[in-house]
Image (spheres, rainbow, N blue to C red):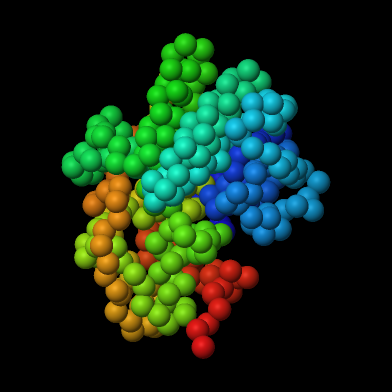
Amino acid sequence: MNYQQFHSTDISGYNFLVTGGAGFIGSNIVEYLVQYNAGHIRVLDNFSTGSLENLAGFSHLPNFELMKGDIRDPETCRKVMEGVDYLSHQAALGSVPRSINDPVTTNEVNIGGFLNILMAARDAGVRRMVYAASSSTYGDHPALPKVEQVIGKPLSPYAVTKYVNELYADVCSALYGFHTIGLRYFNVFGPRQNPAGPYAAVIPLFIEAALKNVSPVINGDGTTSRDFTFVENAVQANIRALFATELAQHEVLNIAVGEATTLNELWEHICAILDAELLPVYKNERKGDVKHSLADISKARQMIGYQPAIKVRKGLEIATSWYKNSCHQPVSSK
């Protein structure tokens, strides 16, 4: 991908750690670091959801290092911090349905693992830690657009874990002076997002359905809306946040586009891109899902200069092309 629109910092003299770097967002961050010649790039992943395929284009590089390990192990977290200047913490167990089915493991990874990483980064003297927060933190608060300082009650174990991350980061800032930035992602999509498995996100599932010429399943009546955010925008936010010069406390920023798209509209966009004519199958809404989500991104604009460059339709075109031409292309139905 082309990151020229926001790249301005010489990163060749710095060492980076990307936890969950074999995953969807993490591997896209790694791609940026490779493209702009980071001094050293270390990836930590346990491959529970990540894939070696996502790192295939980088593994041969002399400045790339892959460490297989689990953030639930404090010693692994301490070891992986050695020599690190900047940390992008993407490792987590995502998915609201997964957390409902297995809240214990979600808690162990997303809270216990997060705290291990946070303390290890503090102790190692990492210059800046940016971590993946979530729009699920807004819970049942009905106001739109979502602003960082106003949240409701969490609606899933996953949402609870991501909110606890913010609480720990805030306490760490107040007690120890280790200031971090949490990025509340709003439904990130794009290349390397896996369409397989029971907890796949809606956009890769929709694209897979269109490529297979089968009707997708929509939970609810299709009027559920989301602020779908192309992954290049999330990468931009991570890099800008890592190098934000003035930070006097822990901060949380919405990372989105600032535009709402319903599931029905999303499917219409994908059908138009792939020249498909299929009607979706509607089923019951999922437990723990928020009905509508739309971000106010003015704080991210002000604090880190975030400016989403790719809107939903363009992002869908890029993602669809990737799924069609990559090894992740779904097998056509017979």
Image-based side of 322 in relation to 123, left or right: left
Looking at the image, which residue sits at the far top?
A: 175
Quarter of the image holding residue 90? top right
Between 156 and 244, the one lying in front of the other is 156
In x, y percent, where is residue 285? 26, 58
Look at the image and tell me whether residue 115 can be seen: yes
Quarter of the image holding residue 225? bottom left
Look at the image and tell me whether residue 9 can be seen: no
Between 248 and 91, the one lying in front of the other is 91
The structure residue drawn at horizontal position 29% and vertical position 63%, both measured from the top left corner, is 219
- Position of 280 relative to 241 (above/below): below
Between 278 and 326, the one lying in front of the other is 278
In x, y percent, where is residue 228? 36, 55
| Count of numbered labels shown in the rendering | 0
In x, y percent, where is residue 55? 68, 54
Looking at the image, which residue sits at the far bottom?
A: 334
The structure residue drawn at horizontal position 18% and vertical position 41%, both measured from the top left corner, is 143
The structure residue drawn at horizontal position 46% and vertical position 17%, both measured from the top left corner, is 173
In x, y percent, where is residue 187? 39, 52
- Position of 133 relative to 276 (above/below): above
The structure residue drawn at horizontal position 51% and vertical position 61%, both measured from the top left corner, is 197
The N terminus: image quadrant: bottom right
